[in-house]
Image: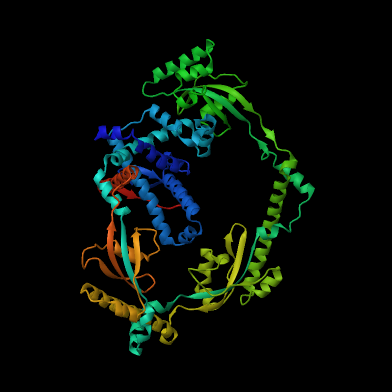
Amino acid sequence: MLEKIREGSQGTWAVVILGIVILSFVFAGVGGYVSSSSSAAASVNGDDISQTTFQRAYDSERARMQSQYGETFTALSSDPSYLNQFRQSVLDRLIADKLIEQVAAELGLRVSNAQIREQILTMPEFQIGGQFNNDRFQAALRSVGFQANTFRDYMRNEMTRQQVAQALLGSEFALSNEASRVLAMQQQTRDLQYITVPTSLFSEQVEVSEEDIDIYYQQNLDQFDTEEKVSLEYISLSSEDLMADMDVTEEELKDLYDKSSNEFQSEETRRVSHILVELGEDQQAARDKAQQAVDRLAAGEDFAAVAADLSDDTFSAENGGDLDFFSKGDMDPAFEKAAYELAQVGDVSDIVESEYGLHIIKLTDINAAKVTPFEEVEAVLAERIKREKATEKLYLIQTEVETLAFEMPDSLNDVAAATDLTVKSTDLFTRNAPPEALSSPVVVAKAFSDELVQDRVNSEVIATGDNQFMVIRVKQHEPERTKGLEEVKEQIVTQLTAQKAQDAAREWAQGLLTDMQAEVNIAEKLAQMDLGWELQANIGRFGSSVPRAIVDKAFQLSTAKDQNQAVVELASGDVGIVQVNNIHQNQELPEEQLRAMQQRLAQMQSQGVYASLIEALRVKADITVYNLAVN
């Protein structure tokens, strides 16, 4: 098994898996997979999944869902039960990953530096014009909080775990005759004829009695329950509403600029190259190797040449050890301290030890700190001052509104008049469909609270976001109830009429089918109903204008006598009769399509095996969930 895993991890499937898993997760922001936290979300066989890891995975998946589904996901997220399921699905994925990592460790799987290097060099995120670009590589890593060494460790962990998945995905296969059968069925076409029997032809024959209505009503009471509804009056205000009226003086702008000088001063950044020697198990050998680098530099050898020859950071070594520009706080503290102690461009440090190993650092460039001119930030300063003034004014108005709404609880009109606000109102709405302006869960909960519904008083000030508030009161309330029979009688009659008409149409169609199977001429019956056959040739499984139910049923029938006809209910409520006359098989299946089908079948089987492995590991594992809290 181990040999199969090692072999499978080198194939084309590995590229697909790594593309899906590594790229989508790393650059979606799940850098937390490589960090740890003292607070665990779960434990898998004694190996913790940190709360930090879970939080970042949750944030990343939520951002992806929000981007993909927009308001639909926002609406779902307002449901606590859905969010609980969502959190659990994220944790389940992390648990599955952890289980596979443990299997990889048990099997002793490893990924070499050369494999990692080869994979990174081919990743399009790090390429310009199809070629690996170190500047882009460094910038991409910084954007997700990685350094070259930590990213390499992350890649090693992910690629090792994926060897297990690759072995399973690469071990399944589909035979060519399996693919041929499936593809032939997909490309099969049929000649058919069908009759559409409109239920409207039987509506006048249908009688709906009072007893029928009463029975239907009693059996379907839940169908006639109404949801509780309220309509509201409200006043609202935000700092954004006030900003346009805020004035800013030149003196205020200059004063804020002087006070914010540090903010408009870019930090000094430094560009360095380094030679890295990893300590490993034989630390003395590592120190000897680092000293060898120092000696070669002292003897006048080119730093880039020594880095290419000796540095264990294979990615930067290809570029003379270059690590691009960085600022304080970006690097390991010991590394950063040594880099900023170098006085002149070209200076080289002594051996520096960090958590990643031993470094020799060369300063290659300095971007001095710069102060942004006042004119370039004037607009930013003006907006900031306006926002501060608007926030201050908002607080004063909010305080006044809160007092007035409490002192005059029976109306918002006086509150609005005293604070120069406008009273707005809504139509009746349910808990699940509030107007957009009142869609905050806090506002909805308050609107349907007993206090506001029964006492009809003003609410307290409700914070609806950063620097915005609202006060509401119930204008009208409709409690949940079951509609009376007289209210829904017409609706019931319509439903029963349609149902009985369909039953009658189905019965008539079934009788017609019986006659056809007995070889009785049905032409007269069709003429009486002004119906006829519609002929369709070479109908495929998808994409035709024939009703979907007719096509689905046609592909379930054969051409054998008494097995080629059926009655079917249509989505429109009408009834159809379908007859299959001929089946056409595509005898010349394109080789390219056969190979693609064979690959898809193998992939489906592999996914099933992978899912079974995860389930089997979960059954045997000791899994404890501690905390699914998220911020």
Total number of numbered labels? 0
Q: Is residue 439 above or below residue 211?
A: above
- Quarter of the image containing the N terminus? top left
Q: Residue 130: where, in percent of width, then height?
A: 50, 32
On the picture, is 342 further left or further right than 546? right
On the picture, is 263 further left or further right than 318? right
Q: Residue 536: where, in percent of width, then height?
A: 35, 64
Q: Is residue 443 above or below residue 189?
A: below
On the picture, is 153 further left or further right than 423? left
Q: Residue 203: where, in percent of width, then height?
A: 37, 83
Q: What residue is drawn where x is 68% and y is 39%?
A: 264
Residue placed furthest toward the right: 250
Residue placed furthest toward the bottom: 210
Residue 313 appears in the picture as rendered: no
State the residue in front, 559 or 219.
Answer: 559
Color encoding of the figure:
rainbow
State the residue in front, 49 or 184.
Answer: 184
Q: Is residue 230 above or below residue 90?
A: below
Quarter of image, res 468:
bottom right
Residue 575 appears in the picture as rendered: yes
Q: Residue 587: where, in percent of width, then height?
A: 28, 49
State the residue in front, 244 or 547.
Answer: 547
Quarter of image, res 363:
top right
Q: What residue is drawn where x is 68% and y is 53%?
A: 388
